[in-house]
Image (spheres, rainbow, N blue to C red):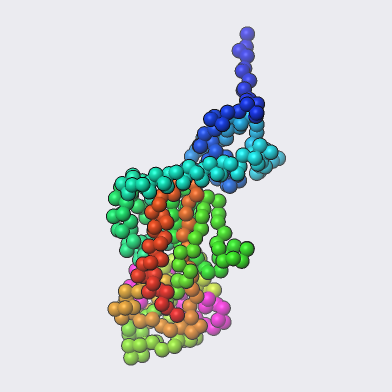
Amino acid sequence: MKPTRRKKRIVPLHTASPSALEIRQLRAFVALVDAKRVTAAAEALGLAQSTVSEALAALERSIGAPLVLRQRGGHGFELTEAGRALLPHARKILAAVNDAHVAMVATTSRARANVDIVANESVSSYLLPDILPMLRQRWPSTRFTVSVATCAGVRDGVAGGAFDVGLLLAEPTADNASGRGTPSPTPFTDRRVVIPTVPLVLFASTSHPLVRGGASGLVRHSALAGYPLFVSDAAGEFHDLVHQFFRREGVDGPVIEASGSVEGVKKAVITDRRAIGLLPAYSVAEELRAATILRLNLRPAPPRMRLDALLSQSRARHPSAEELLVAIVQSPRASHSAGFK
């Protein structure tokens, strides 16, 4: 005789016990709603796809009703009535769990934790080194690690759950459709404007042909024609912004080259008397103060950017994340940058 297969027992909805619900199941459910796909939800949570699928199936068994219905062709899904009813409560529960974790960590500076930060190179090299020692002293049992990435890498890393905090330069016009000036969040991401205005500084060596008598007067775009202009990256939003800026003027501009790093830009300018550099103001503040390089007062002025922070919503937030953002705003380099007109 063939063994009889036991049917799965579905608990009727009205008899399902609240104690049967688990945080991991609710987290998988909310992640699926936000990410739209099981694979994306699994990536954001740092779990295997099968683990997320099993958590969702277990949640449906606990509820006693399906929560999502897959659309034809396997592309996308829609929430059932039970799913729509559960979603706001699931979000509240997860928010409460996160708040509890933050409150617990905040009670003692010696609570063990990891805070993973990803940032653009200029931020990691010129803003974070002045701030992280203070945070490490404030949280001696917390390990702060920093990774460097392009803007796209910062966004993907935080949205994918690999990092707690992301810091990136963005165009000031990168706002949402509401017109209120607040950047639109992506799934699993809380986006903040940390420094609303980050000027870009055009600079040259003290022996550059455009510098007269150790000082720089006004420089028009046409005067830059033929000079090598060094930026740090060969591609990305910063590089595109610079290209668009010079094309918009409709005159022959400089020849844009990438050095691969902020320090590479500075060295190119110092070693080549014809070279020009373009970098965020906070990354050249010390050199300008020491007059090892001179600012070229370009008119029209170079574009401005802003510094945004991305905070993961799929990882428990450490209190130091908020302290980090406040410290950046109050840092001397950021204050110096704000003084450029």
Query: Horizontal placement of 107 versus 37: left or right?
Result: left
Q: Quadrant of residue 287?
A: bottom left
x, y percentage for residue 248?
Answer: 56, 78
Question: Which quarter of the image is occupied by the N terminus?
Answer: top right
- In this rendering, the answer to whether 2 lies above or below 40 is above
Q: Is residue 80 left or right of residue 208?
A: right
Q: Is residue 134 above or below residue 332?
A: above
| Residue at 51% from the left image edge and 37% from the top image edge | 23
Residue drawn at point x = 35 percent, y = 81 percent: 294
Give residue 231's quadrant in the image: bottom left
Left or right, residue 60 beside residue 148? right
Residue 339, horizontal then vertical, whole percent:
41, 77
**From where the camera sits, is residue 124 visible?**
yes
Say above or below: 5 vs 311.
above
54, 176: nearer the viewer: 176
Give, as a single range, the part of the protein colored magenta.
Answer: 245-270
Q: Is residue 55 above or below residue 335?
A: above
Q: Residue 66 location in percent, x, y?
A: 65, 33
Residue 94 vs residue 289, the one in the foreground:
94
Q: Nearer the viewer, residue 54 or 279?
A: 54
Is residue 160 found inside the magenta-colored segment of the image? no
Quarter placement of the C terminus: bottom left
Q: Position of residue 14 (x, y in %)?
A: 65, 28
Q: Residue at x 29, y 55 (%)?
A: 137
Q: Within the magenta stretch, is there residue 266?
A: yes
